[in-house]
């Protein structure tokens, strides 16, 4: 699912640091760019993503980063692309999740209802603290049907810092654990799915690893940093 991929890419502390500034999530660095590889449960590479900053600007006293993410298959074909804003204030960081839905529906917006509770991180991330719930609700009406899609990020908790190894290098990472619930109704069919996600963040890079599990604890996908600049 497209929104599923983007959501888990968006979204974290590690052992001897009590509190970490919120820019560990999205580093404020001009021309920042990174590539991440995506693997299935058997560690087969199934795709990769490229994240880069289009711009960093000051708007009404706030810092706004415009982010572009492209997802590629293993033959380097673009299979998905999303553009969104990350906004820093004096007290929090906000990821604008409404823009994910709006871009996907293009000229159909008149038939779409979008309600969002954006992803918020406080300025200081302290281990064992809870983060506010985030959600995105999309409803599309046609002459004959009404379809809806909802993503809920809940139980968002900052865990103790942890060392992880990537390509022979040790990173002491901020970790955020959360549940992602996806509810959708298409025609007469309704379904709900729940995933558990653990994200690992590192200073000046942001997300460097993400693990997604099903509700029974089985690993589904792993996303790992390849390189950055």
Image (tube, rainbow, N blue to C red):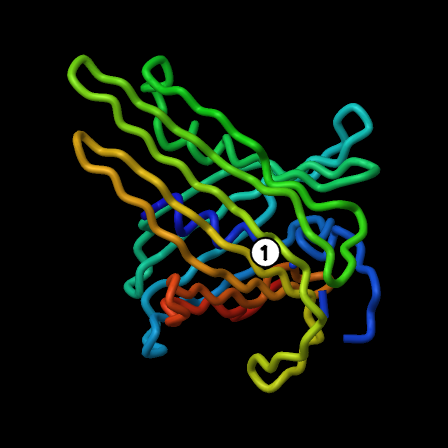
- Is residue 50 depicted above or below 36 in this figure? above
Residue 165 horizontal side relative to residue 109, left or right: right
Q: Nearer the viewer, residue 100 or 80?
A: 100
Residue 15 horizontal side relative to residue 196, left or right: right
Q: Residue at x 65, y 43 (%)?
A: 132
Secondary structure of the residue carrying tag 1 is strand
Which residue is tagged 1?
Answer: 33
Picture quarter with the C terminus: bottom right
Tell me which corner region of the image, top left, top right, bottom left or bottom right, holds residue 55: top right
Q: Position of residue 81 (x, y in %)?
A: 40, 44
Q: Position of residue 220 (x, y in %)?
A: 36, 67
Q: Residue at x 41, y 70 (%)?
A: 217
Q: Position of residue 21 (x, y in %)?
A: 80, 54
Residue 183 horizontal side relative to residue 27, left or right: left
Tell me which corner region of the image, top left, top right, bottom left or bottom right, holds residue 209: bottom right
Number of labelled discs?
A: 1
Q: Position of residue 71 (x, y in %)?
A: 39, 53
Residue neighbourhood size for the residue with mark 1, other residues' Cα within 10 Å, grouped as few (<14), some (14–19), many (≥20): some
Q: Nearer the viewer, residue 148 or 21?
A: 148
Q: Residue at x 34, y 74 (%)?
A: 41
Q: Nearer the viewer, residue 2 or 118?
A: 118
């Amino acid at each position: 699912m497209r929104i599923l991929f983007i959501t888990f890419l968006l979204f974290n502390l590690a052992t001897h640091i009590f509190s970490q500034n919120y820019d560990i999530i999205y580093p404020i660095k001009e021309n920042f760019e990174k590539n991440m590889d995506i693997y299935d449960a058997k560690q087969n590479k199934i795709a990769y993503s490229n994240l880069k900053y289009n711009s960093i600007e000051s708007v009404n006293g706030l810092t706004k980063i415009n982010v572009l993410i492209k997802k590629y298959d293993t033959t380097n074909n673009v299979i998905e692309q999303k553009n969104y804003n990350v906004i820093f204030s004096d007290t929090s960081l906000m990821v604008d999740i409404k823009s994910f839905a709006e871009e996907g529906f293009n000229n159909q917006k008149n038939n779409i209802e979008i309600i969002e509770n954006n992803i918020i991180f406080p300025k200081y991330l302290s281990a064992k603290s809870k983060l506010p719930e985030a959600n995105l609700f999309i409803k599309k009406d046609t002459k004959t049907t009404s379809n809806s899609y909802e993503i809920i990020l809940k139980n968002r908790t900052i865990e103790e810092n942890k060392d992880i190894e990537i390509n022979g290098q040790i990173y002491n990472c901020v970790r955020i654990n959360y549940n992602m619930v996806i509810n959708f109704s298409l025609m007469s069919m309704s379904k709900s799915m729940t995933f558990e996600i653990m994200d690992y963040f590192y200073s000046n890079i942001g997300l460097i690893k993400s693990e997604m599990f099903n509700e029974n604890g089985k690993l589904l996908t792993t996303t790992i940093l390849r390189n950055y600049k």
